[in-house]
Each structure stands twice: as C-alpha cells, then as structure tokens.
Image (tube, rainbow, N blue to C red):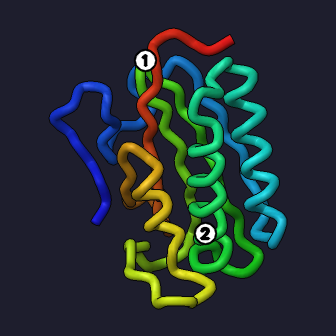
Amino acid sequence: MPSTLPDEPDTLAPDQALDGAVEHATMLFDRRRTTPCTARSFVAMTLTQWGRTERLDDIRLCISELVTNAVLHGAPAGGQVLVRVELHATVLRVEVHDGGNGTPAKRESRGTADGGRGLQLVSAVADHWGVMERQGPGKCVWAAFHHSAVPTC
C-alpha cells in the first residue's frame, strides 16, 4: 500500500504539485532499455547542482526502480517516461510519469524470482511513496525523502 502521511506538514501528499517548491527539474525520456541509467544520471546531476546529495544513493535506487517499472510495464511501445525532481523546504520528491494503464502495487516477491521487488525497495528506502492519476492517460508514481533544511557542501 502506498505510504502517505498527509498530517505531516512537509510530507507531500499525492495531490500536491509545485506548491512551495524551491527548485524543480523535469526531463522526458524515450522508452528504452537505457532509460533507467540515463534517468539516474539526470537525477544525480540535478541533486549535485542543488547541493542535495545527502540521500543520493537512496534516491538513485528509487528512481532506477520506478523508471524500470515505467519502461517495462507502464509506457507503451514508442512512448516516453517523464522524470520530475522537486525540492521543497525539508522534502525532496521524485516523480515518474508514464502513459500506461494499470496501477502499480507493492507485491511479495517469490523466492528466487528475478523481478517483483522494485516497489518493496522503494517502500523500504523512501520516506513516503504513492501513485496518483494524471490528467490524460497514465499515472505518476512518486517517492519523497526528508532532508535537512541546510544544503550539503
């Protein structure tokens, strides 16, 4: 089940968009096998430019899993995946948008199966995550990470 804590002031509920964002960056990627790697690089470069690398490994892992899911299960053939990074006062939020049907759900992995652990990892690493509908086709899967109010050097 997606994790949302709307009673916490700096937790970004699914219906919050850019309200109060200090910084944001967005990039559109073609649906390719290389898209998760390219998206990880985009997010890492963005966070480095913002001086917000304190949770970089966690965020890169989550972006990798969310983009992989979008490429494998969400974006239709010939489609695209949009990655958005939003920096708020004490929360950093990443979003992955695709045009596919269906709603991702965390599921129990099956022993030695190669797949099926992506949202388990996101749930374990991110402070909050969820799925929201978009205007038009598809969905947005997001993850939020608390950070200090002071940027890292």
Circle on res. 40: none
The C terminus, quarter of image: top right
Residue 59 is situated, as x and y percent measured from the top left of the image, at 59, 44
Of callouts 2 and 1, the N-terminal one: 2
Q: Give x and y (percent) for residue 34.
A: 83, 65
Quarter holding the N terminus is bottom left
Front residue of this view, candidates 73 and 58: 58
Residue drawn at (51%, 80%), measured in percent from left and top? 116
* Front-lying residue, 2 or 95: 2
In whole angstroms, how far apart are the C-alphas of marks 2 and 1?
A: 28 Å
Give the residue at mark 1: 89
Residue 4 location, x and y as percent?
Answer: 27, 48
Residue 123 locus on image (x, y percent): 40, 58
- Check the image and report above or below for 129 versus 137: above
What residue lies at 74% left-to-right and 60% top-to-bottom?
Answer: 36
Q: Is residue 133 above or below residue 145?
A: below
Q: Amino acid at mark 1?
A: Ala
Local packing at callout 2 (Cα closer than 10 Å; few below 14, some 14-19, many 20+) is many
Q: Residue at x 64, y 43 (%)?
A: 57
Amino acid type at circle 2 is Ala
Q: Which residue is mark 2?
A: 70
Q: Which sits in the foreground, 139 or 65?
A: 65
Label 2, secondary structure: give it: helix
Residue 29 falls left or right of residue 5: right
Q: Secondary structure at mark 1?
A: loop
Instruction: Please tell me which residue is depicted at 45% across the width and 13% down the height of the picture.
Output: 149
Does residue 114 sit above or below 124 in this rendering? below
